[in-house]
Image (tube, rainbow, N blue to C red):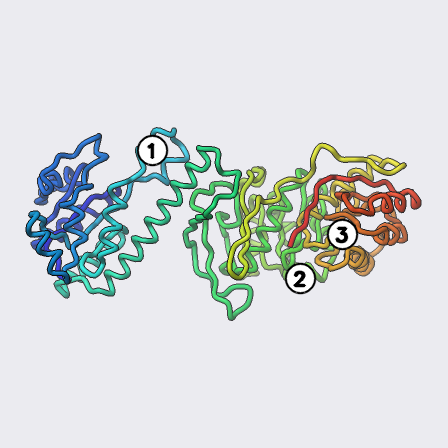
Amino acid sequence: MSVKRALISVFDKKGIVEFAKSLSDLNIEIISSGGTAKLLKSEQIKVTDVSTFTGFPEMMDGRVKTLHPKVHGAILADRSKKTHLEQAKKQGIELIDLVVVNLYPFEQVINNSNLETAIENIDIGGPALLRSAAKNYKDVACVVNPARYPDIINELKNNKKISEKTRETLALEVWEHVAHYDVIIETYFRKVFKKDKKPPEYLNLTFKKWQDLRYGENPHQGAAIYIDTNFNGPSVLNAKQLQGKHLSYNNIQDAASAFELVKEFDEPTAVIVKHNNPSGVASSHDIVEAYKLARSVDPEAAFGGVVAINQPVSGDLAKEIISVFVEIVLAPSFSEAAKDVFKVRRNLRLLEIIDFKTKRAPYKEYKTVAGGLLAQDADTLLLEKGMRFITKRKPTREEMQAMLYAWKIAKYVKSNAIVYARPNRAVGIGAGQMKRVDAAKLAAMIARDYSGEISLRGCAMASDAFFPFRDGIDYAAKLGITAIIQPGGSLKDEEVIKAADEHNIAMIFTGVRHFRH
């Protein structure tokens, strides 16, 4: 496909002068409008104004410039159809072979502007031009990405035309770009019009590829990371990586879980996550001591885990961390001494996330299943105000602290989940069991096997969902558990409460369930 005439209308002027000069040097006629035409003329590049090309003036503050049959007819005419060419000639339409357009910066302005400004940054003519050119890619090349300019010029210089393969690539870029643009606009107005709480009839999502991954959960699975370009809160994906290998698919999931859990705590806290479950959590005024306690919950599980610290990492803490192999350490900052210590483990990833204190605003979670997608509000709620003290004995202050500590952890443990804890640390964590009483037994086994002198007597128990039977309560009593926090809501609640009273256990109903599948 040879190029005789090009239409250029761009908001982002990066590289456009050099590109247009190269086109002009190749004797390609340039049609342009508005600020683009003004810029090119100032650089002594010969330009035909769109208004001259169409015989119709720009109007309505530039809202109507290229929306004209002479423009779209010049782009959409199928060169293989004699009738199209005859109609173009009859209407005085001169064909356009190259469309170079990028759009008003709607995505960039919406975070810090009012509705009127947002509306004026909705591009109408630009997407229409791109759609027309992409539809007729067999005859017209369409360029939306300024990074493509050098390749286009080189191809024109070397081959005197733009190949069909290149035109296919350019058209696909256009469809991706315009689709993204439309979704950003729809998402913005869904919020403005207060329609974002109700699930939409069509779920349109747009994420930008951040990087390819070596593989997914397993080596035979391809994978990539995509980011929400409008998200501006703290995240593992926008963390600063100070050293180590690229993050893997599993690394990212574990690090994200560790980060969200450690943010639940205001006091100095260490979290260790393995296979997307916490294996240890502890708090102390001394963060080194907190880490040691967290690791002691399940030392073997800590091997190869992800460590999250909500305090600056010192050299002493770094030495303690590398005494066991771990994959990732994430924290708000690392001292120079800590960085020096970690250098001996070149593959160890260090992630610096400065803004640890920001709580996550409500957001949506998505999970694919064969044939579709599940969407839900993310579980950002920890407790509701209406906690109920439902047993004869009320918890002591220390028991209350232990229950709340266990409850924070249970929220991030795969269901069925049971957590045993003291006021400042987890003691045993049981995750992912089909029966709740088995989760209780697993958590006890971990505590007994690895906690040294620490017993479960006097600990609190947290359950992510209700107890369907009293067997979990009876088992907890044998361990010496004195306080239990759970959502309640079982048909057997009265039986469960009776069991707690028989064992003199204090129990709280939260009214909030934290299933995590």
Q: CA distance from mark 1 to mark 2?
A: 53 Å
Q: Earlier in the sequence, mark 3 or mark 2?
A: 2
Query: Which mark, residue 303?
Result: 2
Question: Which residue occupies 26% across, 43% down?
Answer: 12
Q: Amino acid at mark 3?
A: Ile
Question: Which residue occupies 75% across, 56% down?
Answer: 430
Dot 3, how many residues are within 10 Å of its Cα: few (below 14), some (14-19), or many (20+)? Answer: many
> Residue 340: percent from the left, percent from the top?
55, 53
For residue 65, side relative to residue 347 (left or right): left
List the residue tagged with mark 1: 119
Q: Nearer the viewer, residue 156 or 81?
A: 81
Q: CA distance from mark 3 to mark 1?
A: 51 Å
Count the marks.
Answer: 3
Tell me the quarter of the picture where residue 448 sits: bottom right
> Residue 206: percent from the left, percent from the top?
42, 49
Q: Which quadrant is home to the N terminus?
A: bottom left
> Residue 365: percent from the left, percent from the top?
55, 48
Q: Nearer the viewer, residue 477 or 147?
A: 477
Query: Which mark, residue 418?
Result: 3
